[in-house]
Image (cartoon, helix red, strand yellow):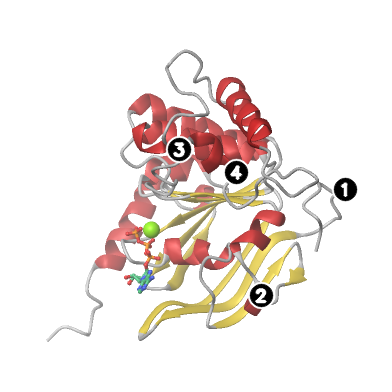
């Protein structure tokens, strides 16, 4: 594995590829036989009903939950699933902007920003001053929070939903992620804040990165994604390009999925 230092990128076809990936939580089989490949500059919109398995899938791809079977390849290399972890996913430059309330609530921002990958000096002590300085720089340069009373010492619990998403996005930019995963980043945001998140997804694409974008707002995801992957009760029900399926047709497809299957009734 690399030391976390950015190395010249070798050529690879897929940033991540899952093959027959299954995840179980006790008796609940949350994901079954997921085959999914994400290319280097792919924006994949992941959609599906509540409980379809969207969050579980990104957790399996980022080392948060361990698949019960199947294979995972990162930059075309097989991953040892028994040893895969969140820390390894960070080192591989995967960043996740989690569904609400994910940032440590009681922590100051500078600490939260570096959670799981502190800057240490040569004696192994955390370099608080440097972390504060970088956190302030990101807040001011990337996120435009100057003058609104937010600084590196602000407590996460005092931030609005949009500000929290902004922090998570700033972190993804700072750590120069290759794959950015957004789990419903616009939920409960005001219109202006939603626009900022959508601009960020465009920036991911323009800067040559890849993203998995989970979104309930079909118009947003249909407009932004290169590919739409529909999950239904833990399985992939469809994988299409937006150009092949209009927003109306996509909406109807999702509504049909929710209908009880013909033949089962009676
Ligand atoms: N830690 C867990 N323990 C037990 N069951 C879980 C756990 N996490 C998820 N599940 C179950 O797995 C299934 C998929 O959940 P998941 O959170 O992936 O859905 P989702 O598609 O992200 O839904 P939503 O749109 O509501 O966020 C659900 O049935 C859920 O109850
Ligand atoms: Mg979810």
| Residue 53 rendering spot, x and y as whole percentages | 41, 67
Q: Earlier in the sequence, mark 4 or mark 3?
A: 4
Tag in front: 2 or 3: 2
The residue nearer to you, when weighing 138 against 230, is 138
Task: Tell how many labels.
Answer: 4
Q: Which residue is mark 2?
A: 83
> Residue at the spot x=49%, y=33% of the render?
166
Above or below residue 232? Residue 124 is: above
Q: Residues within 10 Å of mark 3 (few under 14, many from 20)?
A: many
Q: Residue at x 77, y 52 (%)?
A: 4
- Between disc 4 and disc 1, the foreground one is 4
Gap in angstroms between the C-alphas marked 4 and 1: 24 Å
Quadrant location of the C terminus in the rendered image: bottom left
Q: Which residue is mark 4?
A: 114
At label 1, counting other C-alpha atoms closer than 10 Å, the crowd grade (few under 14, some 14-19, many 20 or more) is few
| Distance between mark 3 and mark 1 Cα atoms | 29 Å
Against 147, is 164 above or below? below
Residue that mark 3 sits on:
165
* Circle number at residue 8: 1
From the viewer's perspective, is the residue at label 2 or at label 1 nearer?
2
């Amino acid at each position: 594995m690399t030391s976390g230092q950015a190395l010249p990128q070798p050529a690879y076809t897929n940033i991540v590829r899952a093959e027959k990936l299954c995840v179980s939580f006790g008796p609940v089989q949350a994901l079954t036989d997921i085959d999914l490949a994400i290319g280097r500059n792919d924006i994949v919109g992941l959609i599906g009903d509540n409980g379809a398995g969207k969050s579980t899938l990104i957790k399996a791809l980022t080392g948060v939950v361990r698949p019960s079977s199947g294979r995972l390849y990162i930059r075309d290399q097989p991953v040892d699933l028994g040893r895969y972890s969140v820390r390894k996913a960070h080192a591989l430059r995967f960043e996740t902007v989690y569904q609400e309330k994910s940032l440590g609530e009681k922590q100051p921002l500078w600490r939260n920003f570096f959670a799981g990958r502190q800057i240490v000096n040569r004696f192994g002590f955390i370099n608080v001053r440097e972390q504060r300085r970088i956190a302030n720089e990101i807040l001011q340069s990337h996120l435009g929070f100057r003058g609104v009373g937010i600084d590196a010492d602000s407590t996460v619990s005092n931030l609005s939903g949009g500000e929290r998403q902004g922090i998570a996005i700033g972190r993804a930019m700072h750590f120069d992620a290759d794959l950015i995963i957004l789990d419903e980043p616009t939920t409960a945001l005001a219109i202006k804040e939603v626009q900022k998140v959508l601009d960020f997804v465009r920036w991911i694409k323009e800067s040559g990165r890849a993203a998995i974008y989970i979104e309930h707002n079909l118009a947003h995801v249909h407009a932004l994604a290169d590919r739409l992957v529909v999950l239904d009760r833990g399985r992939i029900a469809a994988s299409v390009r937006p150009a092949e399926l209009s927003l109306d047709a996509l909406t109807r497809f999702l509504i049909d999925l929710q209908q009880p299957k013909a033949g089962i009734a009676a």
